[in-house]
Image: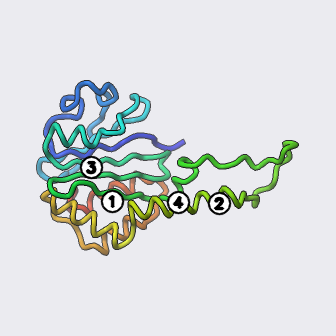
């Protein structure tokens, strides 16, 4: 079983639990050590700490007035990235979206009505069509590749960071790692949050 949780990336010296004390799950946030850019901190909130509100990004931004980035990790398989800045209001991307689909849409059981196993190669065409439609809808809102990298770079500049070239960011957005959170940390580096 992989990691389930949210990375909270803030330009704030205060931990998220002090920024938003009413959100109980933030009390269990662990600081992620690293050579982060001046003024930035990265926190990890495990799902076992409790539920985070859907509008966490907006709440953090409203209280701090600073750029915020969240990375929601699904079983170490995929990461949903959302960010807001000063003039860039929202940027969104998925890392390893292909591997998120089984969590976003429950796959059908590979058994017939009599309980017989349909085999390793079995697939449900209706489910596959639904997956492809959902994937297309997600990518229309949160593109990867060069389009997503351009948006990511714009967010990073708006946040006062010095990001890498669009091509380097795109290679991470379209990259593949065994643990999706490793890809997320690479993205932070490409955005200028952890310069080397």
Of 107 and 75, nearer the camera is: 107
Q: CA distance from mark 2 to mark 1?
A: 31 Å
Q: Give residue 55's position: percent from left, percent from top.
A: 31, 39
Q: Nearer the N terminus, badge 3 or badge 2?
A: 3
Say which residue label 3 marks: 69
Q: Nearer the N terminus, badge 3 or badge 1?
A: 3
Say which residue label 2 marks: 128
Q: Is residue 23 above or below residue 152?
A: above
**Can you say which quadrant of the picture contains the C terminus?**
bottom left
Report the mark closest to the observer, 3 or 1.
Answer: 3
Of 107 and 182, nearer the camera is: 107
Question: Residue at (25%, 46%) from the top-left corner?
Answer: 9
Say which residue label 1 marks: 186
Q: Give residue 186's position: percent from left, percent from top.
A: 33, 59
**Can you say which quadrant of the picture contains the N terminus?**
top right
Q: Can you tell which mark lies on residue 120?
A: none
Q: CA distance from mark 3 to mark 2?
A: 31 Å
Say which residue label 4 marks: 98
Callout 1: SS: helix
């Amino acid at each position: 079983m992989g990691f389930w949780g949210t990375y909270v990336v803030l330009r704030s010296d205060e931990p998220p639990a002090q920024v938003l004390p009413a959100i109980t799950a933030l009390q269990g946030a662990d600081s992620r050590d690293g050579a982060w850019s001046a003024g930035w901190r990265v926190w990890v909130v495990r799902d076992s700490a409790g539920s985070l509100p859907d509008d966490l990004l907006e709440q953090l931004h409203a209280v701090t007035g600073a750029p915020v980035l969240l990375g929601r990790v699904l079983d170490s398989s995929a990461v949903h990235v959302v960010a807001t800045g000063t003039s860039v209001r929202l940027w969104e991307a998925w890392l390893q979206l292909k591997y998120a689909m089984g969590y976003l849409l429950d796959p059908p059981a590979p058994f017939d009505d009599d309980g017989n196993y349909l085999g390793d190669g079995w697939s449900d065409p209706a489910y596959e069509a639904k997956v492809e439609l959902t994937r297309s809808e997600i990518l229309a809102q949160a593109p990867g590749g060069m389009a997503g990298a351009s948006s990511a770079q714009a967010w990073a500049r708006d946040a006062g960071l010095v990001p890498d070239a669009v091509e380097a960011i795109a290679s991470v957005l379209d990259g593949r790692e065994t643990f999706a959170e490793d890809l997320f940390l690479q993205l932070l580096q490409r955005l200028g949050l952890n310069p080397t």
